Amino acid sequence: MATFILPRDMTVYVSARADRNHYDARIGRQKLDSYATSVQWEWQPDPDTTASAWYGHDRSELVFANVNDAVGSDPQLGGPTYPEANRWWMDDTQRNHYAGLNLSRRLGRASLDLAWNWTSSRGRTGYRMNSPGALTVPANAALASGSYPVMVYRVNSLTAGLSMPLGQRVRLRVFDTWERGNLSDWHYFGFEDTLVYDHRVYVDGGPSSYRVNLLGMMLEVAL
């Protein structure tokens, strides 16, 4: 981590982190790596005005292996209970981005605050196998593409608020927040057609994209 003091009452913070884990395992978790970076800028030109901006990025990767075991009690990998042909691997990668802006300005006894926040996440799960025997239903091997559809989570939000004192112990804040989200989760694909599969009935249709605007008022009382 590092902090830089810049001219004109500005400060920049920078951080980086790395976590690398590789396991000597033929079955189970084999790898888990994660990396993250962030930068934040702050500016206070006068006692009544404060502004800040930031950006962050992180990514991670998980590798996992297992065997679709057969009937038996032989504990050896490659034996009749855990045949090498039924071995499979999963590789899960996640990429996340974050950004935001904040501005606060005192207007006499009141104060105005503006904020923008953005989040973008993208996840991909890939897989491979030694043979169709690695699947619970080997007949589905012809449909296997090597990866699931990408999972997406993106949210943009804007907020404007005004705070003002109503007395020595009471303060009022009125605000407006607008938010838009784009979501895609392959676990719920097909639920838009039906929620009934065989004898199972699902009551959760899964996440979906949305757009919303919220007007609110908050009253703060100091005891």
Image (cartoon, rainbow, N blue to C red):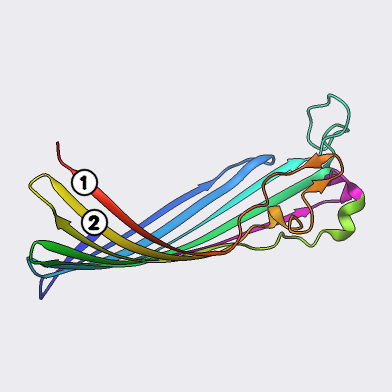
- Please report contact status of discs 2 and 1: CB closer than 8 Å, yes or no: yes
Label number found at residue 160: none
Q: Residue at 61% of width from left, 55% of height from top? A: 207
Instruction: State the residue in front, 120 or 114.
Output: 114
User: In the rendered structure, does residue 97 fall within the stretch colored magenta?
Assistant: no
Q: Is residue 122 magenta?
A: yes
Counting from the top left corner in percent of width and height, residue 147 is at 72, 60
Residue that sits furthest to the front in the current view:
166
Foreground pick, 209 / 134: 209
Q: Is residue 219 left or right of residue 191?
A: left
Image position of 159 (left or right of 199): left
Q: Residues within 10 Å of mark 1 (few under 14, many from 20)?
A: few
Helix, strand or loop for disc 2: strand
Magenta segment boundaries in residue numbering: 119-138
Q: Could you tell me residue 198's position as x and y percent?
A: 87, 43
Q: Is residue 203 above or below residue 43?
A: above
Relative image position of residue 107 (x, y in whole percent): 11, 68
Q: Please, is residue 94 above or below residue 63 in the view? A: below
Q: Is residue 54 visible?
A: no
User: At 76% across and 55% down in the image, what residue appears?
Assistant: 128
Q: Which residue is mark 1?
A: 220
Q: Is residue 119 left or right of residue 163?
A: right
Q: What residue appears at the point 7 percent right and 47 percent down from the top-left corner?
A: 168
Residue 58: image x %, image y %? 45, 59
Residue holding disc 2: 173
Looking at the picture, which amino acid does disc 1 mark?
A: Glu
